[in-house]
Amino acid sequence: MFELFFNLSETVTTTLRFFSEDFVVTNNRYISLVEVLITSTLIFIIGILGIAFNRKNLIVLLMSIELMLLGVSLNFVAFSIFMENPMGQLYAMLILTLAAAESAIGLAILVVYYRIRKTISLDSIKFLRG
């Protein structure tokens, strides 16, 4: 147990090298900036595809929006580390806070909608009046 903690702390305290070959140290392997950007782009594209292919279920739409925001915040964090400027991490925290608020409000609306219509299908949502 303690050996795992010390190995992890040794990995975390390893000096970070940027862009050319090294970006973040994990298990004695360096992750480059390009790999992080490809990962965040894939997460963002999965979110777009979730919105494009599913227009019936509100829960899947909310999850897709969350994936898109996660991809954007991962880009902010990656460039923040790369440029050694903490503003990107600050914006990422702001994005994650807004995403949590959006999920809470969206799920509250979903609960009220389900109580009225007894379904979460978005086919009849245009009939709502407010």
Image (cartoon, rainbow, N blue to C red):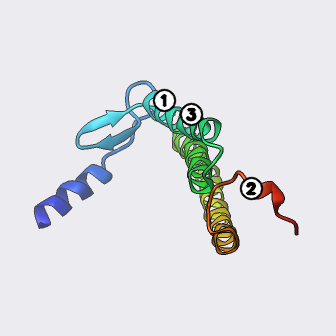
Seen in the image, is 108 located left or right of residue 59?
right
- State the image coordinates of residue 103 (x, y, percent, origin top left): 62, 63
Of labels 3 and 2, earlier in sequence is: 3
Measure how far apart labels 3 and 2 are at the Cα level: 28 Å
Disc number lying in front (1 or 2): 2
Amino acid under label 3?
A: Ile
Residue closest to the eye, 64 or 9: 64
Residue closest to the eye, 60 or 92: 60
Of labels 1 and 2, earlier in sequence is: 1
Instruction: State whether residue 2 is above or below residue 65.
Output: below
Find residue 118 and report its image quarter.
bottom right
Instruction: State whether residue 59 is above or below residue 45.
Output: below
- State the image coordinates of residue 54 (x, y, percent, origin top left): 60, 42
Q: Which residue is mark 2?
A: 124
* Circle 3/circle 2 CB separation < 8 Å: no
Q: Which residue is mark 3?
A: 45
Seen in the image, is 58 located left or right of residue 5?
right
State the residue at coordinates (66%, 72%): 108
- State the image coordinates of residue 67 (x, y, percent, origin top left): 55, 47
Q: Residue furthest right?
A: 130
Q: Which residue is mark 1?
A: 38
Q: Residues within 10 Å of mark 1 (few under 14, many from 20)?
A: few
Find residue 127 and report its image quarter.
bottom right
Disc number lying in front (1 or 3): 3
**What secondary structure is found at the residue carrying circle 1?**
helix
Seen in the image, is 25 located left or right of residue 73?
left
Amino acid under label 1?
A: Ile
**What secondary structure is found at the residue carrying circle 2?**
loop
Disc number lying in front (3 or 2): 2
